[in-house]
Image: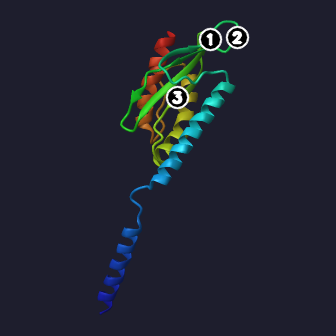
Amino acid sequence: MRRIAAWAMSTLTVLVLLFSYNTSRSSQTIASAQTRAVTSRTTSSADSQLTGTSSSGSSGSTGSSGSTGAGKSYSGDEVMTRYGVVQVQITVQNGKLTAANVLQVPWNDRHDQMINSRAVPVYNEEAVTAQSASIDVVSGATITWEGYTKSLQSAIDQAHL
């Protein structure tokens, strides 16, 4: 009798946990995540403007060179990964890569946001340090790394570095 009661209680507990598990997100949560992504990208653009880089979303080169000292910006190709598009922009001054910024990165859910908010700053710093697309992968962000390095190499090729 005790076994039956224990079995019934454990089955009931499992069913309650199973049905209380949220498998899909409501549209309100999705809208909130998209708002945070847009806000994050807007903030990133504002930060880029403060550092003297352009955040143009088009492929090709933008910016200016000469006596302004701001350098010239080059946007790499948009690289499609299985989670979304990755695009990198670099700033070149005096023949050296001085900044790398992400224009596009997968930001669809909390998992993407968690991974890319940690990995992208590391990739940006590594690109400037290495002065090439030969950068180390951040554990857990391999797919982003593949798209990042392809787009980065495209921008470096445009800059003839």
Query: Which one is in front, 58 or 69?
Result: 58
Q: Position of residue 9 (x, y in %)?
A: 36, 83
Helix, strand or loop under label 1: loop
Given residues 9 and 44, the one toward you in this image is 44
Q: Which dot marks residue 109?
A: none
Q: Secondary structure at mark 3?
A: strand
Q: Amino acid at mark 2?
A: Thr
Left/right placement of residue 5 relative to residue 125 reads left
Name the one closer to the observer, 55 or 149: 55
Task: Give the residue at mark 2.
Answer: 68
Q: In which image quadrant can residue 4 be found?
A: bottom left
Residue 103: give its label: 3
> Left or right of 39: which side holds 3?
left
Q: Residue at x 41, y 30 (%)?
A: 146
Question: Mark 2 packing: few (<14 Cα in 10 Å), some, or many (20+)?
Answer: few
User: Residue 155, how many percent across, how many down?
Assistant: 48, 18
Disc 2 to disc 1: CB gap under 8 Å: yes
Q: Residues within 10 Å of mark 3 (few under 14, many from 20)?
A: many
Secondary structure of residue under mark 2: loop
- Measuring from the top left, give residue 37's x and y in whole percent: 54, 41
The quarter of the rendered structure image containing the N terminus is bottom left
Q: Can I make out residue 161 in this image? A: no
Could you tell me how far apart the alpha carbons at marks 1 and 3 are, in whole angstroms? 18 Å
For the residues bearing labels 2 and 3, Cβ distance under 8 angstroms: no
In the figure, 13 relative to 50: above or below?
A: below
Task: Identify residue for label 1.
Answer: 64
Residue 69, visible in the rendered structure: yes
Inspect the image, locate mark 3, and give the three-letter code of the amino acid beneath it: Leu
Name which quarter of the figure residue 18 lies in.
bottom left
The correct choice, above or below, for 69 with respect to 78 in the image is: above
**Which class describes the residues within 10 Å of circle 1: few (<14), some (14-19), or many (20+)?**
some
